[in-house]
Image (cartoon, rainbow, N blue to C red):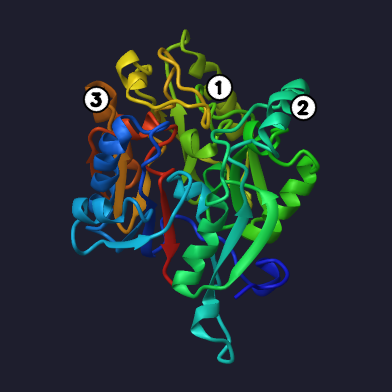
Amino acid sequence: MELKGTPVEHGFYMPPEWELHSQCWIGWPERPDNWRDHGVHAQRAFANVASAISRFEPVTVCASSAQWENARSQLPGHIRVVEMNMNDSWFRDTGPTFVIKNSVSSKEKLGNKIAGIDWNFNSYGLFGEKVIIQTCLIFLGIEEGCYEDWSLDLLIARKVLEIEKIPRFPHSMILEGGSIHVDGEGTCLTTEECLLNKNRNPGLTKVQIEDELKAYLGVKMIIWLPRGLFGDDDTNGHIDNMCCFARPGVVLLSWTDDKSDPQYERSVEALSILTSATDAKGRKLEIIKLHVPGPLYLTDEEVAGLQQDGDAKARIPGTRLAASYINFYLANRAVITPQFGDKKWDDEAVRVLSSAFPDYEIVRIEGAREIVLGGGNIHCITQQQPACP
């Protein structure tokens, strides 16, 4: 069912990720130009993430018709596997943004306590046909997106909502779920690098984008960080690699003490903004630094495992990977956190997250490098569905 108007007009708002979930949605990776060796390594990593989350909440994995049987065979029986074709498996960005009501009148059905926003999507910055991409966009200085055909991804949010029989708010504005974080009390975190990029919504001003976020997420204040994580070129600096809320008034920030690392300038820049900011409740923010792993780079062997045919963004050996411990999934009383094989910083991330979430179990996902090779990580491949209040 399609709802007219905005979520706020209907009494909806986006809840924070630490509120109770009814389930988690995950896509299944397969495209050979983004996931090496026909996706076998990434599929193992995705299965590990799904299995870890399923200890704390129900999980639904969506796999294409060609991959359904393979996905079913790799996942525990208690995880639901549904058939859904897609262009790639970034459900944080292509799945619906769920919104809920705090209360509901006796005249309204239970189903109307939750709805989903179906944002527009353009493969992280593509417009129109290939010839336009190669001429006009380059001439205008607009960075290209990640893959040419995203027609299937445009249907993912709608399909998820149809499966769950949840009302849908369609929106023409291009926005990926990884570009926003909310505290549930009126504050949203995002980056100018992404939301103000000319390859997303060139016809909208910053004020107009803020107005849309307020009308659809139910927030009252947007804190803009200038840039996201260094090397996060695929998404143009999504916030979910850079900074997130741990609870109202407390944020985690990707950090490095290495002044020679290009990430240092970005982290210091963000720290300055956050230090001077107040949230929608007027609180100064407590900032917890979460150190990034040592620099990771795409190897010749990893690139050799890809079938690069020009339909997706080229992967080049030596490229810095956008690895960040901020990109975790907050399950019901658990933090599902990536591990990159850097023992010093892997262990430090677990220590910091244990302190930030004292009542949560910290679950390590070894081998998360296989996910970051595709351009994102655990938060990027998951989408929480909140429980109805």
Image location (x, y in percent) of residue 263? 49, 19
Q: Which residue is mark 3?
A: 341
Eyeballing the image, is 268 above or below 158? Answer: above
* Above or below 177: residue 160: below
The image shows residue 45 at horizontal and vertical percentages of 27, 40
Label 2 element class: helix
Residue occupying the point 30% across, 45% down: 336
Horizontal and vertical percent position of residue 257: 42, 16
Specify the quadrant that holds the N terminus: bottom right
Horizontally, is 349 left or right of 310 in the view?
Answer: left
Which residue is situated farthest in the top direction here?
A: 260
Where on the picture, by quarter, is residue 24? bottom left
SS type, badge 1: helix
Tell me which residue sits at (55%, 17%) in the image.
265
Q: Are marks 1 and 2 in contact (CB under 8 Å)?
A: no
Q: Which residue is mark 2?
A: 136
> Residue drawn 57% across and 49% down?
151
Q: For mark 2, does the 10 Å Cα neighbourhood hold few (<14), some (14 to 19), or many (20 or more) residues?
A: few
Disc 3 is placed on an element classified as loop
